[in-house]
Image (tube, rainbow, N blue to C red):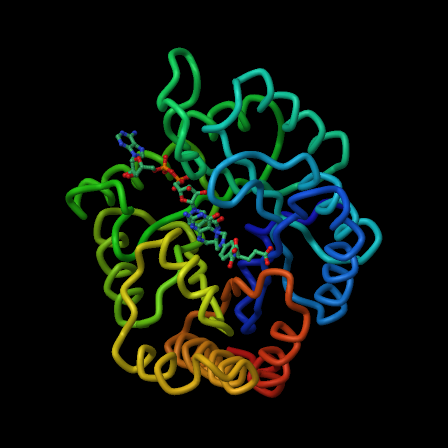
Amino acid sequence: MTCKIRDILKDQTPQVSFEIFPPKTDAGYDSVLSAAEKIAALKPSFISVTYGAGGGTSKNTVSIASHIKDDFGVTSLAHLTCVSSTREEVHQVIDKLKEKNIDNILALRGDIPKDNAFPLPNQYRYACELIEDIKQQGDFCIGAACYPEGHVETEHKKDDISNLKTKVDCGVDFLTTQMFFDNNIFYNFLYRIREKGILVPVLPGIMPITNKKQLRRSMELSGTAVPQRFLAIIDRFGDDPEAMKQAGIAYATDQIIDLIANGINHIHVYSMNKPDVAAAIMNNLSAILKIED
Ligand SMILES: NC(=O)C1=CN([C@@H]2O[C@H](COP(=O)(O)OP(=O)(O)OC[C@H]3O[C@@H](n4cnc5c(N)ncnc54)[C@H](O)[C@@H]3O)[C@@H](O)[C@H]2O)C=CC1
Ligand SMILES: Nc1nc(=O)c2c([nH]1)NC[C@@H]1CN(c3ccc(C(=O)N[C@@H](CCC(=O)O)C(=O)O)cc3)CN21
């Protein structure tokens, strides 16, 4: 049985998906798998598995994504980045994904590692080149990333949207957004891209910030604006781990409820490897996720 995310996204009942990252070393493998199992037990619409956040690659993404699908019974979305690999290496990973019958790939350029030369001659430069290769190699459902506040490397927001249109036209089935902490930024972005003819489903990406260190790391990755309302939370609760966790989960829940209230039915949550955070969010939404349109 195939389970393509583009088909899941046709369902108009509110649904939540989660993201996890593979271990940095093999020693962490079992604990990540156990977190994935607990998150899968919450029955999200799918679980995505990153591939070297902040640069680099991961040899465990394919294996974790295949356990999620085959052993834990939840659709998986394997991230694949192309900037830290040769074309040949990328083709080998695509082959492995095909072998394991993984239907969904999030095709990313990837973060540029600090000490690497970029772009390398004859290697990948943009996500759209990766998308073209994935399409040639198999029948995958392809997702890609988009940036409601503009990509950090792009000078003009309008260039970012025209680059996004080029990317989507290469054969993207759905988009996930970079994290944002103010829903108005997302609504505005959605309006602007629809106006430019980008019509694929867009999943807002919500990151529950449950400690101070994570906020710093997330800001480095995304360059996202942090609203005053959220800064006040960090200021007041940042040094009390339990209070910060509760406030971060409540803030993310509030964003999700507002999105669902405004007709956005599929939400991607960057809860990363934290089953307790994922469970708390699901619990906060228990009645809302049963509502039919
Ligand atoms: N869920 C996730 O894991 C997410 C990851 N990211 C990360 O964001 C980074 C960028 O990845 P992608 O969005 O896939 O890259 P991309 O290739 O779509 O865009 C990268 C930059 O190049 C520009 N660009 C794209 N296509 C172009 C073209 N044809 N001509 C000229 N300029 C072009 C874009 O405007 C942007 O500034 C990666 O670090 C990725 O890992 C971002 C959001 C979510
Ligand atoms: N530029 C960019 N690269 C990404 O890989 C990425 C995004 N943006 N935005 C969306 C998601 C969010 N991602 C994230 C977000 C936070 C952490 C994080 O907090 N990492 C901590 C903890 C790691 C650990 O516990 O081992 C870190 O310090 O790296 C990781 C990946 C991955 N994704």
Relative height, residue 152 to residue 242 (above, below) = above
Most distant residue in the right direction: 71
Relative height, residue 293 to residue 74 (above, below) = below
Relative height, residue 17 to residue 50 (above, below) = below
Residue plotted at (41% across, 11% down) = 122
Which one is nearer the viewer's eye here, 174 or 119? Answer: 119
In the rendered structure, the answer to whether residue 241 lies left or right of residue 195 reads right
Most distant residue in the top direction: 122
In the rendered structure, the answer to whether residue 192 lies left or right of residue 27 reads left
Q: Quadrant location of ligand 1?
A: top left
Residue plotted at (68% across, 34% down) = 59
Image coordinates for residue 153, horizontal then vertical, percent: 26, 41
Which one is nearer the viewer's eye here, 65 or 132? Answer: 65
Q: Indicate the quadrant where residue 137 lies.
A: top right
Residue plotted at (27% across, 64% down) = 225
Q: Indicate the quadrant where residue 140 lies.
A: top right
Image coordinates for residue 219, horizontal then vertical, percent: 36, 58
In the rendered structure, the answer to whether residue 98 lies left or right of residue 246 reads right
Image coordinates for residue 57, horizontal then vertical, percent: 57, 34
Q: What is the number of callouts on the image?
A: 0
Residue plotted at (42% across, 25% down) = 129
Most distant residue in the front direction: 239
In the rendered structure, the answer to whether residue 284 lies left or right of residue 40 reads left
Which one is nearer the viewer's eye here, 97 or 112? Answer: 112
